[in-house]
Amino acid sequence: MIQEARQQFLHHHEYSELKFEGFGLIMADAAVEFKQQLNYADIVRISVGADGFDKLGFDLFYKLELKSGDEWVLAGKAKTAMLCYDYTAQKIAGLPEEAVKKLKLGFVG
């Protein structure tokens, strides 16, 4: 679910993991904090936001909420560290300033 949310977040900003201001993205690490059990038929809302920008990458933060009656209950949180990556040269690349401007717009979800 988090991977799909990341893809939709990037698409919302007219990017993909392989088309990111002339480079690609590669995940450096991931952390997940579970709060509620989720099942296949559950209705889940995931909000995604970017922060922690530095010269090589940024963090994506995810908030997963479970529909429970008329309310949304926190089901989990996650973070993935994303680095800009030049897949042709097979090395880490600098984070383009244009991408920072686009991604700083706030949570999408």
Image: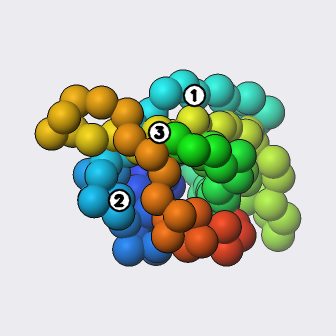
**Residue 92 at x, y percent in the picture:** 37, 34
Disc 2: CA contacts within 10 A as few (<14), some (14-19) or many (>=20): many
Q: Name the residue tied to disc 1.
A: 30
Q: Give the residue type that dot 1 points to.
A: Ala
The residues tagged by marks 3 and 2 sit, at their Cα atoms, a distance apart of 11 Å
Residue for point 27% across, 41% down:
86
| 60 and 4: which is toward the camera | 60
Q: Name the residue tied to disc 2.
A: 20
Q: Give the residue type that dot 2 points to.
A: Phe
Residue for point 35% across, 59% down:
20
* Label pair 1/3, CB-CB below 8 angstroms: no
Residue for point 67% across, 37% down:
78
Q: Is residue 72 above or below residue 76?
A: below
Q: Give the residue type that dot 3 points to.
A: Leu
Name which of mark 1 and mark 3 comes first in the sequence: 1
**Residue 7 at x, y percent in the picture:** 40, 56
Element type where label 1 sits in the image: strand
Name which of mark 3 and mark 2 comes first in the sequence: 2
Whether residue 39 is visible:
no
Residue for point 63% across, 44% down:
54
Element type where label 2 sits in the image: loop
The residues tagged by marks 1 and 2 sit, at their Cα atoms, a distance apart of 20 Å
Q: Is residue 101 above or below residue 4?
A: below
Q: Name the residue tied to disc 3.
A: 83
